Image (cartoon, rainbow, N blue to C red):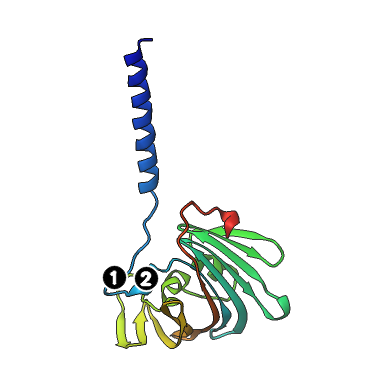
Amino acid sequence: MPSFCRFASFKYLVISCLLLLISACTSQPSLPTATQTLGPNAQLWHWQAQGRIAFANEKNNHSANLDWLQIGYSYQLQILGPLGQGSARLEGEPFKVILTTSDGKQLQASSPEQLLAENSDWELPLSNMVYWIRGIVAPGNYQKIDKQTFIQNGWKVEWRRFAQVDNYQLPSLLIAEKGQISFRLAINKWQLFPAPTFPVSKQGL
């Protein structure tokens, strides 16, 4: 094969690889960044929050230890009841969530709210809580009551206390109620991570 043909083939291969790489990068959803409206906490998408959550509805009251690890849009929530009873683990990414119960049974759905509603008494708005837990409102409409209280998707949410974590003010106590449903989330430990420069596998959570 003449040298110019080999060069043309190599050039075509390089261009094709670059196009595939660009396509793979652009197909990943971009993470929201800080804006004047949302504030600097909107850029926090890599963190771990540990604490305790209490949930109540018209039938039951529950409380458990909570360990929430968030890496981009992927997350793992460990919910552990008193003395190790009633443990559950939620592992999720957009449109795919897996619930592992204390007996090892695994269940899957497209949203964490659907999984919890169908398999437990817990009715937590986790898709909104990933924002509320950082001290910002979730995307969409909301009604502001005061600096620390607002109503969103039927939930009245109040940030009662904040803690200084690195250069950020993050909630240490969040209370929310919707009709006869309420939850109280107390966070005693925050840890912030730098954004990873490589894809994070499920085993990394």
Q: State the image coordinates of residue 134 (x, y, percent, origin top left).
A: 43, 76
Residue that appears at 40% across and 51% down? 28
The residue carrying mark 2 is 42
Q: Is residue 151 left or right of residue 113?
A: left
User: Which quadrant of the structure image shows residue 42?
Assistant: bottom left
Check disc 1 and report its element: helix, strand or loop: loop
In this picture, residue 149 sits left or right of residue 197: left
- Find the residue positioned furthest to the top: 1
Q: Residue at x 37, y 17 (%)?
A: 6
> Looking at the picture, does residue 153 appear above or below residue 3?
below
Disc number for residue 35: 1
Seen in the picture, residue 158 relative to 23 is either above or below; the reply is: below
Q: Nearer the viewer, residue 80 or 112?
A: 80
Mark 2: which amino acid? Ala
Work out which quarter of the rendered image holds the N terminus and state it. top left
Q: Check whether the beta carbons of the residues at disc 1 and disc 2 lie within 8 A of each other.
A: yes
| SS class, disc 2 | helix
Which badge, 1 or 2, comes first in the chain's sequence? 1
Check disc 1 and give the amino acid type: Thr
Question: Looking at this rendering, what residue extends furthest in the front direction?
Answer: 3
Decide which of 20, 11 is in the foreground and name it. Answer: 11
Q: Quadrant of the C terminus?
A: bottom right
How far apart, in angstroms, are the residues tagged by discs 1 and 2? 7 Å
Q: Residue 54 location, x and y as percent? A: 57, 84
Above/below status of 160 relative to 16: below
Residue at image point 55% right, 79% down: 189
